[in-house]
Structures are given as structure tokens and as C-alpha cells.
Amino acid sequence: MRYLRTFELIESVVRAGSIRKAAEDTNLTASALNRRIQAFEQEFGWPIFERLPRGMRLNPAGELLMQHIRMQRTDLARVQSQVADLSGERRGHVSIACSQALLPYFLPQQIAIYRAQHPGVTFSINVRDRAQAERDLASYSSDLALVFEPVHLVEFDVLYALPQWVHAVYPTGSPLGETPTLRLRDCLDHPLVLPTATYGVRNLLELAATSIGRKLVPTVETDSFDLIRHYVTQENAVGFQIPIGLKPEQDAGFGHRPLADRDVRPGQLLLGQLKGRALPVASAKFGQQLVAALEALAPKQAPE
Amino acid sequence: MRYLRTFELIESVVRAGSIRKAAEDTNLTASALNRRIQAFEQEFGWPIFERLPRGMRLNPAGELLMQHIRMQRTDLARVQSQVADLSGERRGHVSIACSQALLPYFLPQQIAIYRAQHPGVTFSINVRDRAQAERDLASYSSDLALVFEPVHLVEFDVLYALPQWVHAVYPTGSPLGETPTLRLRDCLDHPLVLPTATYGVRNLLELAATSIGRKLVPTVETDSFDLIRHYVTQENAVGFQIPIGLKPEQDAGFGHRPLADRDVRPGQLLLGQLKGRALPVASAKFGQQLVAALEALAPKQAPE
DNA sequence: CTGAACCTGTGCAAAAATTGCACCGCATGG
DNA sequence: CCATGCGGTGCAATTTTTGCACAGGTTCAG
């Protein structure tokens, strides 16, 4: 939009860190860009940049303004999306910040279902740990977040909460597969493949281990859930995952079982959005679909 | 702000109902204005006006856009106000939609107190009935609403609720002044001066009258609370008010007593803002002051 | 049926704004 | 101590916006 040009320019100065660099990015002269910034500050009533010998940086007023700009832009997108929906064909873009566990099966399937009905809608899926996902919402860079055990939950509107029991993952044929649920102590005797500390699964396990007076000593520590799954078959090790990222055991190529409630408390997979924000139509509708899908999942996943 | 010019123009077309009239208001030619509207619609992607033989009217897409425009503008004002607050001196403007009862004493006093500390802050006070006040909030034309017994309460964030017993107002010396609280039936024998149906006091009285099998027959019906107060001294009539609009009896020039709980249920004077909206600094701080002031009022007004 | 009074919309030239170019003063860092 | 990169400015070129004149359509009164 033409009338948002000034905001785009401001934003590009913020990104580039200096007028001259930003001028290149925006196909303008430094002088023209400089004067637009100055003109804006004049109208706005206060400077929004600190002039440093090495470039420009936002001052506190500028930070406030940037927040407004981001909000303004996404709200315009929402309006356009609603208008598009008004005229029949649903178009738009949905951006989701999610945990890795959603990548292999759940999200691809849900997106395919949605796009079968609305081929005009596009998606971006951003893999984020639970803290980053919340920051993504707050900065309007994602519409929805689907994360396991989020940290802060301020500014986070919960649309649906699905309990998830932590599952242990082990190679086929391991003695661990003999009981329907597992005790944590039985797992700890094997080499452990654990996610890093930023993940909810690790957090739940640490709490559980501490409460039975044990310590988690990872043989392999990784931020890739894929690697966890693949490593356990190599060394008769034990990994941990949440079930939404796992196939039913017979198809998985490895065994998995939930850990007993009394050892590891179940975590929650939360679908949420930024508090108070009105989402674009496509995102809101996709959110509704996710709620329905998660709801359908809920009873089946309680360990017997 | 220069970059909001297009929005101002759109808004003035909406107000004026035609490009030509709007062109006069904005000191532009109809042709120039016309082309700016067309250019905007082009960029926006959809027409926002219906072209009628008699002028222009917003279409549904335009209605959505206007909501965005209003929101956008007030949010910019909020940012500017926060920036001003950042630099020390508090400036800004507070707009309040309120019931008549707040006009004689409460609001003038509160505004004076606030302005003694922050002379840079200006106020607009818009007298609205309870339904209009809520609409004012929703359209961002008022920051705060202070109303007796609001109707819908959707989109309304309650900041404070003060119970208010309906008081009967009568000329000095009337036998009604003999007991500390009044029965409704005793009032109904006098000529009645009632507010019109849009007001909460009337609503509460109608409910109460119906439940004791009586009907309210107003001798004078008015939307001026001032007139109610002044008329009762003319004809030995009885009027009704809420106490926040009344002086203590000895100074008032007429008598007033609360009606008994069991006859007329007490109403609530609610201070609120639009749900989810971040107010400008001045409005938010004034809101806090009002909460404190209402809190201080609360216990004293319960009828003994 | 007709003409006046509205309305939106367009071609074109004038006016106003934005921009690019050349250059200044200044701090930094090798 | 000089080269480099920074924000800022005067002025002319360029692009955008505007005003004027007028086209084409609908409504409404007489």
C-alpha cells in the first residue's frame, strides 16, 4: 500500500541500521530517505531514532511506534482478508509457530485438509521452541502458535489445550515394550537421548527425575526430534517424544509407550493466539479446524 | 499526520455522503478527491463505496475498513500520548461518555483535581444515555464511559462498579422526609416526574412498579435530570435520581431519600472502556483516579 | 416530456511534492 | 592523519497530485 510507504521506509532503516544501507534496499537515495524520516519525525512530534556516529537506532519513542506499525499492518491484512472472504473466495495466508512434534504428521495433514477446501490460502510454518513461539505471536510474526508446555502465557489466548503424556521411544524388541505404561526408573537405566533444555519434554523429565532423586545424564542431547527417533535404533537407547509426533507403534519402526502419570506429569499441547488480536479470516478458520482436530484426538490419547 | 490524509479524505466522503460535498469540506476539487478515492480502492483491492445516483455510500468492505481506520487513528494517538508521557510532561486529551448524573458535582470535581496536577491535559465530556455511551466506546469516539446500568456490556471492560440506590426527590417539608428510607408505594401517590425510557433509573422503577402491580404514570417526562430536580419544588411532586448527582440534603434545596432495597433494586454505576483497547496515558491515568474516587464513595452511600 | 440540479468520472495542463546529485561537517578506526 | 562511513542540505530534475473544463448519467419538479 502506497500510504504505508513511510512505515516501510522506517522499518527498513531499523533493519539496516543506517540510512545509507536502507537506501540501497529501498531503491532510494540516502538523501531522499533521510528527508522522509526527518519529515515523519517532524509530524510525529518527536525523534524516533538516535543518531549514532555509526548509524541510526530506535529510541524508546521509536520502539513504541514500531509496535504500532506492526500492529497496524497486520490489522490491515486482517481487514483485507475479511473483505476477500466477503466476496466468496477465501484467500490469505496463515502463519503458524509450532513445536517440532507437529511437523511429521499432524500439521501437514491439517494443512492439506484445509487447502483442499480453500486452495487460495497459503501457509508458513515456523518451527520455534516454546519461548520463541510466544515471542512470535507478540511481534505479530505468527498468527497461531501450537506449542507444548509454553513458558509465560501472558499475552497468550488459549484456544485449545490437549493433554499429552510423554512417551519413551525405544528400538523394537526392547524389554520396555512389555508393559502398557512405563516407569521412569526403568528408562533411566538405558542410554538417554534427550531434547535440549528449551523443550517442554526435557523440562517435564527433569522435574520428574529430581522428584525421584535421580539425575538425567544424556548420552545424546539434541534439538532435533528426528534425530531422537532415529538414534534409539542405533544403540538400544531411550528417547522421549510426545505422541502427536509419533505414528501408531506398528507403523513406526520402533516402539513407544507413555510414561506413567505418577512419574511424569502429562504436559499440555496448547493452541493459541495473541491475546485480544482479531485474526485474518483464513487464520481464524484454520484455528477452528485445528481445535476440532485436537478435540477429536483428545480421548484416544489418554493412556489406558 | 500527512500519511493519514487518504483516510481523512475517505472519512470526509463518508460523512458528507458525496464526493462533491466532501471536496468542499477538504478544500479540494471533486476531481482530485475522486481520483484519490479511486486510487485507494485500486490499491486496497476492492471498492469501498457504492456509487449511487445521489452520491457515495460505504459498502460492507468499506464498513470494515472504516473500523480499521478509526482504530488505527486512536492507536496512533495512544502511541503519541505514551511518547509524550515518556518525556516528562503529561499531555493529551481525555474523552468521556457519561450519564447526566455525573455532570453537576462528580466529574467537574474529578477533572479539576486531575488538571491541577496535569494542566496540559484537556477533556471532552459527552452526555450520552446508556446505550449511546457504549456505542461511543465501540466507535472509539470516547475513551471512557461512566454510565448507570449499561444495556449490552459486550465489548465493555468494567473498571469499577459502584452500587447506587435510586433516590426519590421531593420538596423540603414533604412528609416523605420523615423516614430514613422510602417505600415505592408512598411515592407513587404523588405526581411523578420521570426520566424517559432510555435511562436506567426509569428502567429500575418500571421493573419495581410492575412487581408490586402498579403502573408508572408520569406527570412530567423528561430527559433532563436538572428539570426533574427543579420541578419537584414547583408542584409537590416526586422525582427520582441517583445519589452521585445529588448534594447532601442540607445543601440541596430539596429533600431526597433512598428507596428501600426490597422495592427497587439498586443499580450500578459502571466505569468502563472498550474491551481490549489500550488507552492513551492521560485517559488511563484519569480512569485510575476515577476508580479511586468511586472506591472512596462506595461504603458511605449504602442506605442505613 | 424536458430542463435544471445533482452526481461520478476523465483528459490535460499547471502546481506541488518527492527525488537524485553534488557536497558539507563530523566521528571513527586503521 | 587520512580514508571511510555516517547524517544532513541546497538545488535542479522528475514524478505525483491537483484544478479546470467537460462528458455522461440519474433524479425530480413542472
Image: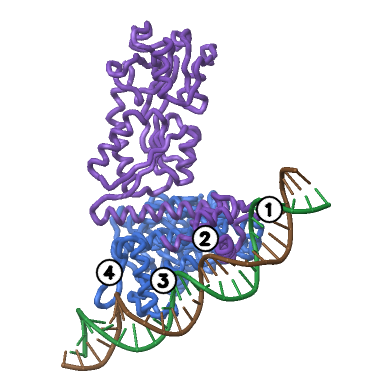
Chain colours: A blue, B purple, C green, D brown
Q: Chain of mark 4?
A: A
Tag in front: 1 or 2: 2
Mark 4 residue type: Glu
| Residue B145 visible at all | yes
Mark 3: few, some, or many residues within 10 Å (few <14, many ≥20)?
many
Considering only order in the chain, which callout, 2 or 1, is on the residue closer to the N terminus?
Answer: 2
Foreground of the two, B227 or A214: B227
Instruction: Please tell me if label 3 and label 2 are on a single chain.
Output: no
Label 4: which secondary element: strand
Estimate the spatial distance between the alpha carbons at disc 3 and disc 2, rounded to whole Å: 28 Å
**Which residue corresponds to mark 4?**
A50
- Against A188, is B217 above or below? above
Q: Chain of mark 1?
A: B
Label at residue A161 = none
**Which residue corresponds to mark 2?**
B28
**Which residue corresponds to mark 3?**
A9
Q: Are marks 4 and 3 in contact (CB under 8 Å)?
A: no
Tag in front: 2 or 4: 2
Q: Residue B6's x, y, as percent?
A: 50, 61
Q: Are marks 1 and 2 in contact (CB under 8 Å)?
A: no
